[in-house]
Image (cartoon, rainbow, N blue to C red):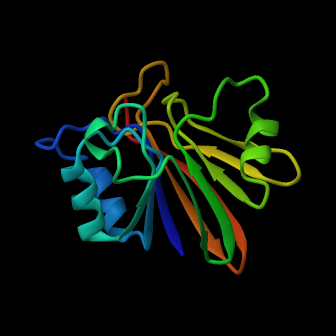
Amino acid sequence: MRVVVLSDTHLPGHRELGVDVQARVEAADVVLHAGDITSPVVLERLAATVEAHAVLGNNDVELAGVLPERLELVLGGVRVAIVHDSGPTAGRERRLRRWFPEADLVVFGHSHMPFSGPGVGGQRLLNPGSPTQRRRSPSHTLAELDVEGGAVLDVRFVDLGP
């Protein structure tokens, strides 16, 4: 299963994700969005293309009451949790394990900084960065996962340029 992971797109309804991002979304089986979509139109476009799961970000005013703050689901046998803001870097691994004790993979956003690494107790943590607002990150990014048989086989960051 090919999974595209996005966060912090910050797109008003009239803007598009971009050709590179849209091509990757169309090639995916599932898209996960870790919040700050900012427009129901963008979410509708994603869901019209592929199975899409998203959580509420701190800038998702128009999506309040539509999206959950936290989401847990199973993809290809992998227990996945999604949250927008994982809190401060210090203590993140333990905090996410406490919030999502059963999750194999925890996806989060908010910082716009791509990150993939181990959590506590075998969890994997993933922040895809942002494909539209890089802020302190050197590049615009998203992540792609290959998931099969209850395992994350591969995690790749896609560098979309400065």
x, y percent for residue 124: 74, 51
Residue at figure coordinates x 64%, y 28% from the top left: 87
Q: Quadrant of the C terminus?
A: top left
Q: Nearer the viewer, residue 133 or 43?
A: 43
Question: Would you identify the image quadrant in which residue 140 lies?
Answer: top left
148 is higher (above) or lower (below) than 88: below
Residue at figure coordinates x 77%, y 61% from the top left: 102
Count of picture labels: 0
Give the residue at the far bottom of this rendering. Answer: 149
Residue at figure coordinates x 32%, y 35% from the top left: 132
Give the residue at the far front of this rendering. Answer: 65
x, y percent for residue 108: 57, 42
Give the residue at the far top of this rendering. Answer: 136
Question: Would you identify the image quadrant in which residue 36 lies?
Answer: top left
32 is higher (above) or lower (below) than 9: below
x, y percent for residue 139: 44, 30
| In this rendering, position of residue 1 left or right of residue 149 | left
6 is higher (above) or lower (below) than 111: below
